Image (cartoon, rainbow, N blue to C red):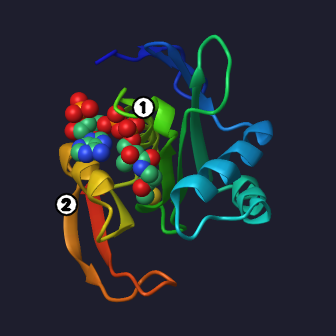
């Protein structure tokens, strides 16, 4: 597993052959395309633009260091109370999976949130999404409960959370 080399808390960092950084405006069409490819209910580009504009939202992205299409991203929002955060989405392009990109991006996001005094983060995961459930377990997340018909197509969600203190 490549270890990230730190190049600044708010800037960019390396993860093996990838460069991680804040999601740029030019990345948004690729995020929308990846959402369409992997999610049953993808966010359309205008919704992503609104989120990217929101001051409480952070999106992180990974690209091959030598250039190339978006490999992975992770978005989350700080809750107005200052103590909590909420996952928007994370996805890794199928060509770049099992290289630690989700671990690196979500881990970086947790660092950023912790530095802002956030004490917990929550998310919702489809009960059928065994890859994400396993990933979150490995990352130390816990399950709070099952939410019936959380998704628009009627699928239940596991509410998941991670303490940051
Ligand atoms: C789930 C997902 C984000 C994982 O991304 P990834 O970059 O491949 O994950 P990582 O390489 O960082 O995996 C870290 C660890 O999580 C676990 N893990 C990741 N994918 C897994 C899978 N498909 N099955 C079992 N465990 C998995 C493993 O323990 C892995 O470590 P290892 O590779 O050393 O065994 C990716 O499969 C994906 O994009 N899925 C579609 C989108 C999605 O469902 N997003 C979540 C909903 S918001």
Q: Residue at x 34, y 81 (%)?
A: 156
Q: Residue at x 45, y 36 (%)?
A: 105
Gap between marks 1 and 2, in whole Å?
Answer: 20 Å
Location of residue 3 in the rendering, given as x and y in whole percent from the top left corner: 34, 16
- The answer to whether the beta carbon of the residue marked 1 is less than 8 Å from any atom of ligand 1 is yes
Task: Tell which of 96 and 48 is nearer to you.
Answer: 96
- Which of the 4 quarters of the picture holds residue 121? bottom left
Residue 146, label in figure: none
In the rendered view, tell whether residue 101 sits above or below residue 138.
above
Location of residue 87 in the rendering, given as x and y in whole percent from the top left corner: 46, 59
Answer yes or no: is residue 114 visible: no
Q: Does 18 sit left or right of 156 as displayed?
A: right
Residue assigned mark 2? 142
Q: Residues within 10 Å of mark 1 (few under 14, many from 20)?
A: many
- The answer to whether the beta carbon of the residue marked 2 is less than 8 Å from any atom of ligand 1 is no
Residue assigned mark 1? 101
Q: Residues within 10 Å of mark 2 (few under 14, many from 20)?
A: some
Ligand 1 falls in quadrant:
top left
Q: Residue at x 52, y 84 (%)?
A: 152
In the rendered view, tell whether residue 83 sits above or below residue 8.
below
Q: Residue at x 63, y 34 (%)?
A: 22
Circle 2: element type: strand
In the rendered view, tell whether residue 135 sits above or below residue 88.
above
Task: Tell which of 117 and 127 is nearer to you.
Answer: 127
Circle 1: element type: helix
């Amino acid at each position: 597993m490549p270890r990230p080399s730190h190049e600044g808390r708010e800037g960019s960092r390396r993860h093996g052959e990838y460069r991680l950084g804040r999601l740029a405006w030019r990345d948004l069409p690729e995020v929308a395309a990846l959402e369409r490819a992997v999610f049953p209910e993808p966010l359309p580009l205008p919704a992503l633009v609104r989120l990217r504009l929101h001051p409480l939202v952070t999106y992180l992205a990974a690209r091959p260091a030598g250039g190339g299409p978006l490999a992975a991203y992770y978005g989350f929002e700080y809750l107005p109370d200052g103590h909590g955060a909420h996952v928007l989405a994370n996805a890794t392009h199928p060509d770049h999976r099992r290289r630690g990109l989700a671990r690196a991006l979500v881990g970086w996001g947790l660092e950023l949130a912790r530095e802002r005094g956030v004490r917990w983060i929550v998310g919702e995961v489809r009960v059928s999404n065994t890859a994400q459930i396993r990933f979150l377990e490995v990352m130390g997340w816990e399950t709070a409960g099952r939410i019936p018909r959380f998704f628009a197509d009627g699928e239940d969600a596991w509410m998941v959370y991670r303490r940051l203190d």
